[in-house]
Amino acid sequence: MRRQFSESCDPLVLRWEDNIIPQGMYPALVVNLLKEGFKMLKEQIPYRNAIKLQSRDLGVNILLVDTIQWLEIHCAGPVHDACTKLRVLVQGSIQSVSSKFSYSSNTLEGTLCQVCTAGVCCRNKAGTSITCTNGDCLPRKIGPRQSCWFIPVERSYEVQKSDLIRLFKDSAAHYMLIGTALDVKVDDLLPIPGAATTNLILVFQRWIDSNKEVSWRKVLQVCDDFPNELGKVKADVEVFLSSDRAPNRF
């Protein structure tokens, strides 16, 4: 069954730092993906740790497997157009589930090694080669079967204030942090109860008016700089940028 879903690309592997999937994460993740529009395929697997889903938006079928140690995502269909978007969607669902259960959403990404079938191939910083966690495998050049998962999300879309507010509204309490990171004036924004959203709107308006590095790349950089406060926002932004809702390019 795994081979059927891995004809065009190696399975994506998501690992947690303690090498075990948090309790309840897998079923909650499946439920969240179904809420996001994924559908269950009629022919299922008689195992409770694997499920076959379909995304009509992406045009692919996926096999989601809980191995206890890590999560495997097998993809079948026009994978080179869909893999990165699928990875972002799954990561967004993991962020959502993690926030509800107070779990860490930090995962290590790689692909299932097709040489030894027992390790995970991790990319180097340059993204040019992969090394298997199984020491018996030699490092090798990354190929299209692995790199399709990690194509950078297109970030050259116009930044709209309405999109920023929608994505950051649940993190409005961090308006001072966000404003400082965007290098706009915040010392005149008073911490009046109930004014956080209003202050956040002012922060984004000042940033857009400044015309200073106003881009989604900058937004993601700010989220990267403060993962504890804005980690979930980053996932939401990446899901948005990979969706049809993203505004037209410049």
Image: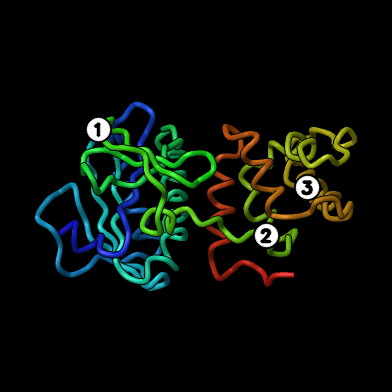
Cα distance between the residues tagged 2 and 3: 15 Å
Front of the two marks 2 and 3: 2
Residue type at the position of mark 2? Asp
**Quick one: label 1 or label 3, which is nearer the N terminus?**
1
* Circle 2/circle 3 CB separation < 8 Å: no
Q: Give amino acid for label 1.
A: Asp
Left or right: 129, with 243 as reference point:
left
**Image point (25%, 60%), residue name:** 6
The Cα–Cα distance between marks 2 and 1, rounded to whole angstroms, is 48 Å
Quadrant of residue 19 in the image? top left
Whole-percent x, y for residue 11 in the image: 30, 53
Which mark identifies residue 136? 1
Residue at the image position 27 percent from the left and 37 percent from the top = 137
Q: Residues within 10 Å of mark 2 (few under 14, many from 20)?
A: some
Residue tagged by mark 2?
Answer: 163
- Please report the residue visible at 73 percent of the width from the left and 34 percent of the height from the top: 177
Residue type beneath disc 3:
Thr
Q: Which residue is mark 3?
A: 198
Answer with the quarter of the image where residue 26 lies: top left
